[in-house]
Amino acid sequence: MTAALTLSRIGVRFSDTTVLDSVDLTVDRGEWVGLIGPNGAGKTTLLRTVTGAVAFDGSVEVDGGDVSTMKRRQLARSVALVPQHPVLPAGTRVVDYVLLGRTPHLGEVTGPSRHDLDVVAGVLDALTLSALMNRDVTTLSGGELQRVVIARALAQESPILLLDEPTTALDIGKQQAVLELVDRLRQQRTLTVVSAMHDLTIAGQFPDRLIMLAGGQVVAEGRAPDVLDPGLIRTHYGADVKILDDGAGGIVVVPVRAPRTDPSGANPDTPRPSS
């Protein structure tokens, strides 16, 4: 396989805090890699490093090109990011916001072409947003807005798609619909996807490979059954879980509740002796 994205010895510091420490990552063209890890592990910073949005040590290569030497428009044609906290200009219609994804492809003088408008219309339709196209983006619900932000990134038609917690504001039906769409487009367009993911069960269902970050370092990587290990999760998340097989090749991560106690200190889950 040909590498679409290569990160070598990436280090990022904010003031006196090390956020990423010597992170190496190679993502093959067409692969979906999921970034998991506890809050503050460095997942979002790693995605922003690929877009050149933060200063970093080490090197980032996109399709063999050094990010540090690429112009902004050139990089945007290769990498699209769905941020966790997007900037939403008040008074902007949904269709115009999604059209901003075409900016890297527009001429400096000419406006959007028929092709640009067709791309936007197709993305709006695929994400069931056509009925909202004339709504102000600031009037949308959290789930609607999340789909609009994803639509803008897909309209960019970049071969590398970065998703930062893409399903956070979505109900379970919309979560599945969005991730299935991403996976379908990935296969149709040979998209390379890197996603920071909070829900470990979803992380175990969609990406081809998982990278677990903790303290700014890679602490585990591989297929979901290897990375979503109760011992690793206990160590780095401080959570006790069970890992279940969903019967269809995926896995489910289930939190295990600590034994309950009543005010007297007794365990109410312990069977009482019969009288």
Image (cartoon, rainbow, N blue to C red):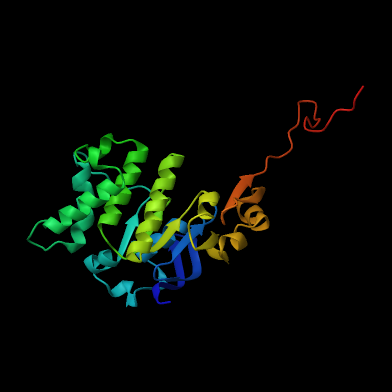
Residue sitting at x 80%, y 26%: 264
Quarter of the image where one finds residue 48? bottom left
Residue 195: x %, y % from top left = 43, 57
Quadrant of the snapshot with the C terminus: top right
Kindly give the residue lying farthest to the front in the view shown: 248
Q: Pick the residue in front: 251 or 35.
A: 251
Residue sitting at x 65%, y 48%: 241
Q: Pick the residue in front: 89 or 104.
A: 104
Kindly give the residue lying farthest to the top in the view shown: 275
Please tell me whether residue 72 is drawn above or below residue 130 in the rendered image: below
Q: Pick the residue in front: 31 or 194.
A: 31
Q: Is residue 58 left or right of residue 111?
A: right
Q: Is residue 16 left or right of residue 190?
A: right
Residue 161: x %, y % from top left = 35, 60
Quadrant of the snapshot with the N terminus: bottom left
Please tell me whether residue 89 is drawn above or below residue 231 in the rendered image: above
Quarter of the image where one finds residue 131? top left
Please tell me whether residue 231 is drawn above or below residue 270 in the rendered image: below
Residue 175: x %, y % from top left = 43, 45
Kindly give the residue lying farthest to the left in the view shown: 109
Quarter of the image where one finds residue 156? bottom left
Q: Kindly tell me whether residue 161 is visible in this rendering.
A: no
Please tell me whether residue 130 is drawn above or below residue 200 in the rendered image: above
Residue sitting at x 29%, y 45%: 148
